[in-house]
Amino acid sequence: MKRSFSFIFFVFSVSCIAFASGGAQDFRQYFLVQTWPPVYCQVHRPEPCRIKPSKFVLHGLWPVNSSGRSSTNTNNQTINVPAMLESNKSFAAEMNKFWPSLTRNENEQFWKREWKHHGRGQPNLPPEEYFRTAITLVKAANLEAAFRDAGINPDGDKLNPRKYTRAINPRYGTTPLFKCLNRSLLMEVTLCVDVQATNFVSCIARPSSLSRCRRKIIWAL
Ligand SMILES: *[C@@H]1O[C@H](CO)[C@@H](O)[C@H](O)[C@H]1NC(C)=O
Ligand SMILES: *[C@@H]1O[C@H](CO)[C@@H](O)[C@H](O)[C@H]1NC(C)=O
Ligand SMILES: *[C@@H]1O[C@H](CO)[C@@H](O)[C@H](O)[C@H]1NC(C)=O
Ligand SMILES: *[C@@H]1O[C@H](CO)[C@@H](O)[C@H](O)[C@H]1NC(C)=O
């Protein structure tokens, strides 16, 4: 597992759809993106959140190219989400728990779109395996536990980004990418994963269009 001690802080574009444009096929790694709903839901307009859990939830597992942009259209397989969920109820429960749609009534539509716009950007995992892998990874990447073990709580304190990085780095051997609202409120955390979807690795890029978090990061409810 490679380690990177460079500190990379930036703001992703607010919409994951922005990542889906283009047809790059140079699949280099995955972004495992987790959202902090209390902040995400402050900016998600015009479609307001229907639920706002106070825990990190999975936004997506996004295959990216060497520029950190979503790779697309390398996999033409289709997903039958209802059949996948029907075939294993405990897996369906995990999908609802770890990967809920914050805005849409239909989780199933959200997951279908994630496959269409992101999952198809990699050739290695067939659809069901892609969703299983995403859940396996997000269960392994327990950000809240990592932060709390490092004494960081969602109490609105302004902390140096290095504190957050140091909470993650020893556990996962990799430096996360942070996305902030207004350059300081923690909104999303990305861990990078190798193309086999088995190890956390250093992130190879951050999308160049995105601005950075400031020198302090606030994790707040
Ligand atoms: C990555 O994808 C973006 C968007 O499709 C594209 O503009 C860029 O050239 C690609 N980068 C590489 C290195 O292929
Ligand atoms: C996917 O389907 C499109 C349209 O049928 C085709 O042009 C493309 O080559 C296919 N891609 C792969 C990776 O099979
Ligand atoms: C069903 O899903 C659960 C939870 O992900 C998993 O532990 C179990 O192995 C799955 N069962 C089958 C038959 O795939
Ligand atoms: C973010 O900044 C804008 C513009 O300065 C401000 O109107 C908005 O209230 C801020 N949002 C939060 C959640 O601080």
Image (cartoon, helix red, strand yellow):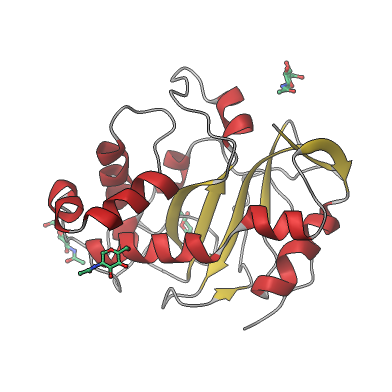
Q: Quadrant of residue 77?
A: bottom left
Using residue 54 as the reference point, say whether residue 87 is left or right of it.
left
Using residue 40 as the reference point, say whether residue 50 is left or right of it.
left
Residue 19 in sight here: yes
Q: Residue furthest bottom?
A: 1
Residue 7 in sight here: no
Using residue 102 as the reference point, say whether residue 114 is left or right of it.
left
Q: Nearer the viewer, residue 74 or 161?
A: 161
**In this view, 163 is above or below 1:** above
Where does the image place residue 33, in percent across and percent down from the top left?
53, 52
Where does the image place residue 126, in percent across and percent down from the top left?
23, 67
Where does the image place residue 187, in percent across and percent down from the top left?
64, 39
Count of picture labels: 0
Quadrant into which the N terminus falls: bottom right
Quadrant into which the C terminus falls: top right
Q: Residue furthest front?
A: 90
Q: Quadrant of residue 103?
A: top left
Q: Quadrant of residue 105?
A: top left
For image coordinates 65% across by 82% down, the residue present is 2
For image coordinates 15% across by 51% down, the residue present is 86
